[in-house]
């Protein structure tokens, strides 16, 4: 079951985005006034078709792209004026396997900790802890290029968590991976969330969002068009599943699997 967000007392949100506009130099308006709030401890999903603005939103939240206007706060730290504190609060697991293939597993984690100013002793303890959590202890001295696909993905997760960020951003973590590895990664990210880390997940897989996320936002054409739990979204769109709600959103409801049986029966 997806974990639910702490509700009663209002704590500082993990991510608070207000009226965010991002216009690229070529004139493309990738985000057209997005507002979004993710509570501390939530497992939040961001779903939308290609070109919807998901990467742009992640890049603005991690300081990789500057917003044109609007406000982004990570645990209360302004992502532009208080960049360092905001950046330290975020761990980013990018979609591409951007690992240095000449380093060992341990060096990969240790260098990341060094970049974030962790002391040698602290880095050592954190590396041991993460290698254990991600079942990589026996691989600590192996070169990253020798790892299996699953181990590489696990290493990317461990690296993103090395400096103990309170918000973990997962950018399509299971794109193109096989079923076993997808289920294995779900197990690890669920565990990370249960231990208290807030997660923002972007994915193309509706089942993934349904399984993992307590709340989901649909983004389309640079705007958040709806948000809620998977069941709430399906109900609001007047359909039976998150997938059908998504198809309504992207204007392709004729693809709904709910119609397939009916059409076949009608033709028979
Ligand atoms: P998604 O991650 O949902 O696929 P993106 O954030 O990558 O969406 O893209 C949103 C829009 O912004 C698209 O129209 C895309 O072509 C455009 N875009 C993305 N990056 C750039 C860039 N560096 N320069 C100009 N346009 C961009």
Image (spheres, rainbow, N blue to C red):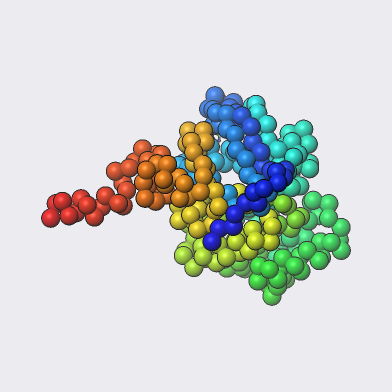
Give me the residue at 64% from left, 32% from top. 18
| 236 up-or-down from 27: above or below | below
> In this view of the protein, which residue sits in the foreground, 91 or 108?
91
Where, quadrant-wise, is the C terminus in this rendering?
Answer: bottom left
| 202 up-or-down from 188: above or below | above
Q: Tell which residue pokes out farthest to the left in this image.
A: 268
Left or right: 204 as drawn, with respect to 10? left
Q: In terms of image quadrants, where is residue 17?
A: top right
Query: In the rendering, at what x and y percent does residue 238 appear?
Result: 37, 43
Give me the residue at 42% from left, 47% from top. 234
Left or right: 265 as drawn, with respect to 124? left
Q: How many marks?
A: 0
Q: In terms of image quadrants, where is residue 207?
A: bottom left
> In this view of the protein, which residue sits in the foreground, 104 or 51?
51
Q: Tell which residue pokes out farthest to the bottom in this image.
A: 138
Q: In terms of image quadrants, where is residue 32?
A: top right
Query: In the rendering, at what x and y percent does residue 13 appear?
Result: 69, 43
Left or right: 57 as drawn, with respect to 241? right
Give me the residue at 24% from left, 55% from top. 261
Q: Is residue 45 visible?
A: no
Query: In the rendering, at what x and y percent does residue 219 appear?
Result: 50, 38
Q: Can residue 186 be seen in this view?
A: yes
| 168 up-or-down from 135: above or below | above
Q: Tell which residue pokes out farthest to the top in this image.
A: 27
Query: In the rendering, at what x and y percent does residue 130 appear?
Result: 72, 65
Give me the residue at 54% from left, 41% from top. 54
Where, quadrant-wise, is the N terminus in this rendering?
Answer: bottom right
């Amino acid at each position: 079951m997806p974990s639910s967000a702490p509700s009663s007392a209002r704590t500082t949100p993990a991510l608070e985005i207000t009226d965010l506009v991002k216009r690229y130099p070529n004139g493309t308006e990738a985000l057209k006034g997005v507002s979004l709030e993710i509570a501390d401890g939530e497992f939040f999903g961001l779903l939308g078709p290609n070109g919807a603005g998901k990467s742009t939103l992640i890049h603005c939240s991690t300081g990789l792209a500057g917003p044109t206007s609007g406000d982004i706060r990570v645990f209360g730290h302004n992502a532009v004026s208080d960049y360092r504190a905001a950046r330290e609060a975020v761990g980013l697991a990018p979609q591409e396997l951007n690992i240095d293939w000449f380093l060992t597993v341990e060096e990969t984690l240790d260098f990341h900790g060094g970049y974030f100013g962790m002391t040698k002793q602290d880095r050592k303890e954190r590396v041991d802890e993460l290698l254990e959590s991600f079942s990589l202890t026996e691989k600590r001295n192996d070169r990253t290029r020798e790892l299996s696909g699953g181990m590489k993905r696990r290493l990317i997760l461990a690296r993103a968590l090395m400096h103990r960020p309170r918000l973990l951003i997962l950018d399509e973590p299971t794109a193109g991976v096989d079923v076993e590895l997808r289920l294995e990664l779900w197990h690890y990210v669920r565990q990370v969330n249960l231990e208290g880390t807030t997660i923002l997940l972007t994915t193309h897989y509706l089942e993934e969002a349904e399984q993992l996320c307590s709340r989901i936002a649909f983004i389309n054409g640079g705007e958040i068009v709806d948000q809620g739990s998977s069941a709430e979204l399906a109900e609001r769109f007047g359909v039976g599943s998150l997938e059908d709600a998504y198809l309504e959103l992207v204007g392709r409801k004729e693809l709904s699997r709910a119609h397939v049986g009916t059409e076949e029966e009608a033709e028979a």
